[in-house]
Amino acid sequence: MHRVAGYFVALAILLGSNHAPALAQEKRLTVFAAASMKNALDDISAAYTAKSGIKIVASYAASSALAKQIEQGAPADIFASADTDWMDYTIGKKTINEPSRVNLLGNSLVLIAKDSRLDKVAIGPAFDLSKLVGDGKIATGDVKSVPAGKYAKAALEKLGAWQAAEPKFAMTENVRAALALVALGEAPLGIVYSTDAKVEPGVKIVGIFPADSHPAIIYPVAATATAKPEAAGYLAFLRSSAARTIFEKYGFSFLVSPTT
């Protein structure tokens, strides 16, 4: 009898040790977000984890790359895009839970420089970016796919400066890579979001593109079609007053009425 009882005790211990990791495994959500959101979203996700106990695993890249990864089956729960086009793309591919979508944030487009001696530049019609950069390069995201690059090209086309400046562009896989090129002195000028310039002490803003020179910069967020149920809570937190305070600290504009 004692031998049988001992067997069951040993079996219980064995099963307990095998299953303990599964039982203790923390809940987590995977967030795919535009590279320009990294600093703000890291802070917000840390605050959400402290509040909910749910760990946030974030992947930052160009919105275009993230949208394609989601389309190919990457296990994301949340998608945060730096433009509406790539969110529309994912909705068209039926990889996003469309009713969960909200246009959360706004931003502005700026010209940055490494050389602190460069004077402020008035950006408007007849703005000659090609002459300003001389023999150097202008860093921005790929103008065919990366939202920051698309906004930059649209602005320069409207201002009549694109054709002359186009050969001088160094296009990167995301906006933070363009920011790094300028901060490292690899490109004397760059076009990024104001929020990027705010977190990089190695650059300064030398000009601001008029808001009407490019499509409105809007960051939509949504749950994916395969999101875990906990995604709804994280999306709600992104709309909260606490999140708004963090986003605005980093220079984003908050486009929705905050929830408590």
Image (tube, grey):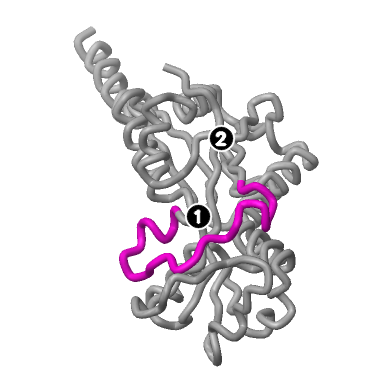
Label 2: few (<14), some (14–19) or many (≥20) C-alpha neighbours in 10 Å: many
Q: CA distance from mark 1 to mark 2?
A: 16 Å
Helix, strand or loop at mark 2: strand
Residue 93 % position (x, y): 78, 42
> What residue does disc 2 label?
104
- Left or right? Give the position of 224 relative to 10: right
Label 1 or label 2, whichever comes before in sequence order: 1
Find the residue positioned furthest to the bottom. Answer: 135
Residue 214 vertical placement versus 90 (above, below): below
- Please give the name of the residue rendered at 71% of the width and 38% of the height, measured from the top-left corner: 95
Q: Count the marks.
A: 2
Residue name at image x 80 percent, y 40 percent: 92
Q: Is residue 7 above or below residue 199?
A: above
Is 186 placed left or right of 49 in the picture?
right
Q: Indicate which label's residue lies in the foreground, 1 or 2.
A: 2
Q: Position of residue 19 (x, y in %)?
A: 36, 27
Q: Position of residue 81 (x, y in %)?
A: 60, 46
Residue 42 part of the magenta segment: no
Q: Residue at x 57, y 42 (%)?
A: 80
The residue sitting at the top extreme is: 1
Query: In the displayed structure, does residue 83 sit left or right of residue 53?
Result: right
Judge from the rendering whether residue 212 lies leftward or rightward of residue 41; answer left or right. right
Residue tagged 1? 35
Type of the residue with mark 2: Leu
Q: Is residue 210 magenta?
A: yes
Label 1 amino acid?
Answer: Ala
Say which quadrant the N terminus sits in. Answer: top left
What segment carries the magenta color?
195-217
